[in-house]
Amino acid sequence: MIPNKYKWQIRQDVSVENIVNTLLESRGVVDKDKFLNSDIKDLYDPFLLKGMKSAVQRILQARDTNESVIIYGDYDVDGITSTSILYSFLKEINVNVGYYIPSRTKEGYGLNEEAVQKIAKVANLIITVDNGIASMAEVKLANTLNLDIIITDHHDCHAELPPAFCIINPKQPDCQYPFNGLAGVGVAFKLIQAIAQEVNMDVLKYIELVSVGTVADIVPLVDENRILTAIGLKMLENTQNKGLAALLSIINKDNKQITSDILGYQIGPRVNAISRLSDAKIAVELFTTDSAEIAQEIAIKLDDTNKRRKSIENEIFKQAVEYIENNNLVDNDVLIVLGDGWNHGVIGIVASRIVDKYYKPTIIFTLENGKYTGSARSIVGFNMFKALAVQEGYMIKYGGHPMAAGMSIAEENMQAFIEDMKISNSISEDVLTPKLDIDI
């Protein structure tokens, strides 16, 4: 039964002569054959991405001179799969490579100055994956330490870009790449694809993990995202990745067809859980190990951790609802919920559940050591990233997308931030009414 809060939007201009054609047309598909028949040959030339040539040359230089390279990842599924495929590939072509995943609770998202200083003592080059585009101060610091940084990211760009060695992000200004909707793992894969062309290697085996990260990051499954996901799903039926095989042995005991639902609702939450409650590096180890025994041990650990995550999430969700109701926030256009000591790794899921319950843009904050760490989720028609950009002066740092973002704010700035968010963001009733588009 569909909730009656939805406003139904039924198209009046469709023909029912061909249901498939009608569905594709209503969803904006221009090239129907390419949409329905995904082929790796339809992927774009990676060198169309701005910064790609410089990045490839720098990485191959690092290989040839045996420089130490560190991949700086992120702790969500997109970041973990990005780190895993780039680490495995660079090892395969004999780059002296390691990886660094910041702690979700102690360090937060993106580059941080302490980590940059540590890495500068042991490496000559950092390659970021799924982060870095908002790390102005950290990149400037790296430059003073003679540490080159190659940024690969897919998040929205701020007005000024960091002064990195080079940047690969299809959303950056003057990038002529035909598709700007890649996930972070998609951008990392394009880097792999470009290097592979130079060293004459095949990259097909990495697409399994690309499909996992792409689906888990909820980017639109169109264009290259659709191609990579479709190929990955086929390969997962007989995966050669020990970690994916171990997870699927727990999740898919009945050997059902591998679908995007299994990636998004089964694999994704288990991978995320380990970084929410433990250490994301464990998940990278899962996807990069050659040992079936180690993979099975880690997969069981991820499954157990996910069960614990659900219990913590339910308790925080209950407290968040009570906060909204007790403080009479239901009628606010943007819901801002303040908690104390809530688990950093779970507040993003809670924000999504609050959006589902109230259909309002939502930011969940947790206070720790005089600083609020927040996770935001939005609704169609309200650009959360732009709303936060207006309040940039209150924040220590922020980043994200129109539909999801993260930020940190000093405790003393929080009330002013809340008041300005109220004043600056009046949302129309039409936007606050969820809609179902009826294709035919």
Image: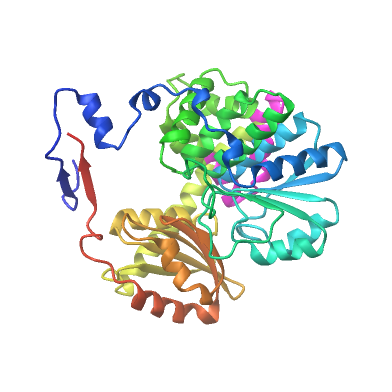
The structure residue drawn at horizontal position 50% and vertical position 42%, both measured from the top left corner, is 182
Residue 196 location, quadrant: top right
- Please state the horizontal and vertical placement of residue 237, each as a whole percent of the image: 51, 19
Q: Left or right? Give the position of 104 relative to 201.
A: left
| Image position of 303 with respect to 117: above or below | above
Give the quarter of the figure containing the N terminus. top left
Chain part drawn in magenta: 270-296
Give whichever of 11, 41 is nearer the camera.
41
| Image position of 260 with respect to 436: above or below | above
Residue 55 location, quadrant: top right
- Please state the horizontal and vertical placement of residue 41, each as a whole percent of the image: 52, 23
Outermost residue toward the right in this view: 65
The structure residue drawn at horizontal position 29% and vertical position 58%, both measured from the top left corner, is 359
- Please state the horizontal and vertical placement of residue 314, each as a whole percent of the image: 42, 53
Q: Left or right? Give the position of 239 relative to 143.
A: left
Give the quarter of the figure containing the C terminus. top left
Q: Left or right? Give the position of 227 relative to 334.
A: right
Residue 305 seen anywhere in this rendered image of the structure: no
Q: Left or right? Give the position of 112 relative to 143.
A: left
Color theme of the render: rainbow
Does the magenta segment cover residue 290? yes
| Image position of 7 with respect to 64: above or below | below
The structure residue drawn at horizontal position 34% and vertical position 78%, both measured from the top left corner, is 423
How many numbered marks, from 0 up? 0
Residue 242 seen anywhere in this rendered image of the structure: yes
Does the magenta segment cover residue 118? no
Prevailing secondary structure of the magenta residues: helix
Give whichever of 220, 343 is nearer the camera.
220
- Please state the horizontal and vertical placement of residue 425, each as a whole percent of the image: 34, 71
